Image (tube, rainbow, N blue to C red):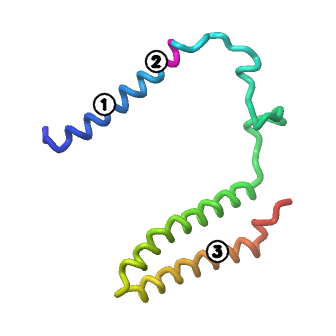
Amino acid sequence: MSQAYIPILLLIAFVIANAVLMLGLSQILSYGQRTATKIAPYESGMPVLGDARERFSIKFYLVALLFIIFDIEAVFMIPWAVAFRQLPDIAGLLLVEMLVFVLILAVGYIYVWKRGALQWD
């Protein structure tokens, strides 16, 4: 076995041992009394209004996808800004690249806006 894999195997063994230890200790140290209050679902202090398996509107998923897309955009802009500041010789290329990226996202945003995905009825 190669020496390069030993740290990875040690890390995997540590993670598995840690998970088993935490699960085992939680079983040993916990009280076994399950009351109706303890097993009831908790939703921000409000009583549950319906079944957890009921269907959601597709608009919920569209808004979630839009949030993820614009969150990825924000995460992408931070390293871009660092590269833009540290690489002044290709700043023009970086600026064009970011403008194309923002333009593509703006077209997608306008599309979902016109389709009414942001209207919550």
Which of the two marks, 2 or 3, is nearer to us in this view? Answer: 2
User: How many other residues sit within 10 Å of disc 3, few (<14), some (14-19) or many (≥20)?
Assistant: some
Query: Considering only vertical position in the picture, is 54 above or below 34?
Result: below
Q: At 64% across and 61% down in the image, what residue appears? A: 67
109 left or right of 89 in image: right
Query: Residue under circle 1?
Result: 13
Q: Residue at x 81, y 33 (%)?
A: 48
Residue 61 falls in image quadrant: bottom right
Q: Is residue 27 above or below residue 65?
A: above
Q: Between marks 3 and 1, how big is the CA–CA gap?
A: 45 Å
- Amino acid identity at mark 1: Ala
Q: Which residues are magenta?
A: 24-28
Instruction: Please tell me which residue lies in front, 48 or 91.
Output: 91
- Sort mark 1 into few (<14), some (14-19) or many (20+) by Cα contacts within 10 Å: few
115 left or right of 21?
right
Quadrant of the image for the C terminus?
A: bottom right
Residue type at the position of mark 3? Gly
Q: Is residue 97 toward the left or the right of residue 2 in the image?
A: right
Q: Position of residue 95 (x, y in %)?
A: 47, 84
* Mark positioned earlier in the residue sequence (2 or 3): 2
Q: Which residue is mark 2?
A: 24
Instruction: Specify the quadrant of the image occupied by residue 119.
Output: bottom right
Give the image location of residue 80, x and y in percent.
45, 73
The N terminus lies in which quarter of the figure?
top left
**Mark 1 and mark 2 residues within 8 Å of each other at the beta carbon:** no
Q: Is residue 26 magenta?
A: yes
Q: Is residue 60 magenta?
A: no
Secondary structure of the residue carrying tag 2 is: helix
**Secondary structure beneath label 1:** helix
